Image: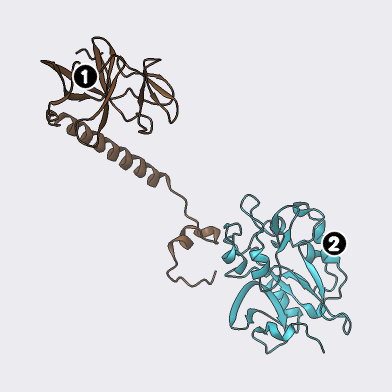
Chain colours: A cyan, B brown
């Protein structure tokens, strides 16, 4: 879409929450951020990770939706749930491997990041990428990212034996082709 | 979109999560549906018409003696079966020289009707349906049609059932 791609580089994130506040200013979901910034292990690290929707090629959230409320457009954007269809069952919230969808109980609707569809479909950058001071969230052309970054982009993720490919890219160390996540490795346990 | 083009179940094809794969009914398809459905209904009506025109006349029902003329007092009722053993009917003598016979099945939900002599009506106790004893027409309540009337003939000193009039109808004189 307009020759730009979305790149997420958690190693650049400084946890300033500018993206969260910029997202919340959007008129399409005013006051409610669709992006979240998480502390990885707050007691021992200052590392933070921003999470936007990765816009999977085969979106699990839409696959598990019993009401056909989540649609993927021809441009690869997985849209937020359709209000007349969403039954607030939270299947998508539980199914998403990246933990993106959020259930808004008061509205009885799931809402998620749609890469600022009102902006990106018109050639503008998403709100979070425009305000990110360290460009941990970058919406640029592929040539730009290849020229300016040491890390390389990937959009292949393994969750156990489940292979997930996405529209949004993650920046990984050079020589890494894909991201492997075994969820059990990251589960909290008593030391 | 790097999605494998494998064979998917029908519901998945019809309700795709990919907006581009959604297929709505086209104008041509809808017009075809309308034309074919109308043709089908037209043909069905022709068939019904032909069937009703070619219908053979119903076989004459047997003549079955029901009662002697002096068997019932005025206001008296006799139950009998006509034309088959599972078609319960009532013969009513509602005036000194007037008899009438009706199917006992209420036309609403087939409860058994009885003759309420004090009000000279046939009454169905299930939902308070009432029929006139003179011609079986509905006087009150939910029944949609008059009671089927049993045609009676007077042969000598006997009343003989000779037919069934499903529409209800004229007063049965005997």
Q: What residue do we see at 46% from left, 60% from top? A: B11
Chain letter belonging to callout 2:
A
Q: In the rendered image, which residue does mark 1 sit on?
A: B71
The location of residue A124, given as percent across then percent down, is: 73, 59
Chain letter belonging to callout 1:
B
Instruction: Give the camera-side residue of B125 and B13.
Output: B125
Instruction: Give the camera-side residue of B106 and A148.
Output: B106
Instruction: Give the camera-side residue of A1 and A126.
Output: A126
Q: In the rendered image, which residue does mark 2 sit on?
A: A21
Q: CA distance from mark 2 to mark 1?
A: 100 Å
Whether residue B153 sits left or right of residue B112 in the image: it is left
The location of residue A46, given as percent across then percent down, is: 88, 80
The location of residue B12, given as percent across then percent down, is: 48, 62
Whether residue B84 sits left or right of residue B28 in the image: it is left
SS category of the residue bearing label 2: helix
Q: How many marks?
A: 2
Which part of the image, by quadrant, shows the N terminus of chain B?
A: bottom right
Residue B88 location, quadrant: top left
Above/below status of B59 relative to A138? above
């Amino acid at each position: 879409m307009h020759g730009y791609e979305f790149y997420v580089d958690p190693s650049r994130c400084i946890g300033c929450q500018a993206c969260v506040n910029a997202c919340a200013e959007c008129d399409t979901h005013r006051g409610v951020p669709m992006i979240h910034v998480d502390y990885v292990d707050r007691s021992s690290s200052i590392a933070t990770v921003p999470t936007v929707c990765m816009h999977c090629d085969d979106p699990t959230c839409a696959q598990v939706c019993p009401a056909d409320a989540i649609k993927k457009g021809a441009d690869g954007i997985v849209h937020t749930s359709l209000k007349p269809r969403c039954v607030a069952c939270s299947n998508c919230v539980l199914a998403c491997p990246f933990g993106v969808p959020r259930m808004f109980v008061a509205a009885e609707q799931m809402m998620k990041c749609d890469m600022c569809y009102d902006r990106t479909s018109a050639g503008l950058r998403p709100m979070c990428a425009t305000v990110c001071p360290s460009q941990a969230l970058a919406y640029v052309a592929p040539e730009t990212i290849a020229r300016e970054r040491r890390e390389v982009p990937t959009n292949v993720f393994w969750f156990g034996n489940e292979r997930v490919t996405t529209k949004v890219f993650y920046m990984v160390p050079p020589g890494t082709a894909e991201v492997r996540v075994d969820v059990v490795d990251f589960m909290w346990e008593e030391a | 979109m790097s999605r494998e083009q494998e064979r998917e179940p029908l519901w998945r094809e019809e309700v795709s999560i990919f907006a581009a794969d959604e297929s709505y009914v086209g104008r041509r398809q809808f017009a075809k549906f309308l034309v074919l459905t109308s043709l089908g209904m037209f043909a069905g009506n022709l068939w019904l018409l032909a069937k009703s025109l070619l219908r053979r006349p119903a076989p004459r029902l047997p003549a079955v003696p029901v009662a002697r003329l002096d068997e019932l007092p005025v206001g008296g009722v006799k139950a009998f079966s006509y034309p088959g053993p599972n078609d319960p009917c009532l013969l009513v003598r509602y005036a000194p020289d007037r008899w009438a016979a009706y199917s006992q099945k209420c036309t609403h939900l087939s409860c058994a009707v009885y003759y309420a002599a004090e009000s000279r009506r046939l009454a169905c106790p299930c939902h308070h349906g009432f029929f006139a004893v003179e011609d079986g027409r509905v006087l009150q309540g939910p029944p949609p049609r008059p009671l089927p009337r049993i045609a009676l003939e007077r042969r000598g000193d006997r009343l003989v059932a000779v037919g069934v009039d499903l529409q209800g109808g004229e007063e049965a004189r005997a």
